[in-house]
Image (spheres, rainbow, N blue to C red):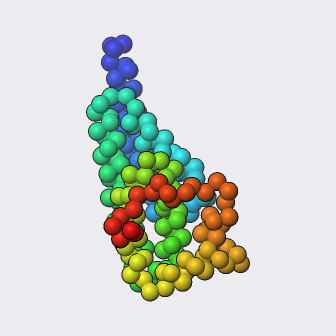
Amino acid sequence: RQESLPRWKRECETAAYDCFFHVRIEELFHIIADYPDSHPAVEELRFVLATSSSGLESQTSSNASMHAHLARHLKNSLQRRLLHPGASTMQIIDVYINTIKVLREIDPSDRLLEAVAKSVRSYLRHRKDTVRCIITSLTDEEAGGDLYHELKRQDARPLEHAQLDSDDE
């Protein structure tokens, strides 16, 4: 009996983390849109993903499937809720910036970001006012855009190590 207790505890923890992960995945679009106010939820999601990857090999494959599920679900949510003509370009850019921040916090390797961001970048390339909105966001202090504030930050992460796709070259 004593030997089965640690296994039972581990199985209960795994089930709880899995349940929590699926609840947070359903809320992920809102978590990203509300960032940085939703920072505690991002930390919880990062913890669950990190915790599920420590330990047994089966958990590592479970962690990979959790990352793949997160990427798939977020891509679909962005496509359905953001990447359509009814969303303003500035709104898309703001959510895209928050997506970068959140996914880099969850996964510093940027694998999740690479899987999710391509469709947003592609969509923005085809919007006629994307360049104007980016320039306004970079230069307009009164508009208070995220890009303006990111440009002013001293600890901003340089893009020189970022992965470029063929359209970016």
Quadrant of the image occupied by residue 121: bottom left
Q: Is the residue 26 above or below the residue 127 in the image? A: above
Q: Tell me what residue is drawn at x 28 percent, y 33 percent.
A: 58
Relative horizontal placement of residue 144, taking residue 162 as reference (left or right): right
Estimate the x, y position of residue 168 in percent, counting from the top left. Answer: 40, 69
* Left or right, 58 with reference to 30: left
**Which image quadrant for residue 141?**
bottom right
In the rendered view, tell whether residue 17 sits above or below residue 83.
above
Residue 32 visible in the snapshot: no
Q: Residue at the location (44% across, 39% down)?
A: 50
Q: Please provide percent x and percent y for residue 154.
A: 68, 56
Task: Tell me if residue 45 comes above or below residue 9 in the rendering.
Answer: below
The quarter of the rendered structure image containing the C terminus is bottom left
Whether residue 130 can be seen here: yes
Q: Is residue 152 left or right of residue 53?
A: right
Q: Nearer the viewer, residue 84 or 110?
A: 110
In the image, 166 versus 76, the foreground residue is 166
Q: 143 or 16: which is nearer to us? A: 143
Looking at the image, the residue that sits furthest to the right is 142
Which residue does the image show at 42% across and 76% down from the upper left? Answer: 124
Give how far across and how far down residue 103 sits, in percent. 47, 54
Residue ID at (51%, 50%): 105
Q: How many marks?
A: 0
Residue placed furthest toward the top: 2
Quarter placement of the N terminus: top left
Give how far across and how far down residue 70 sits, in percent: 37, 54
**Which corner quadrant of the image does residue 152 belong to?**
bottom right
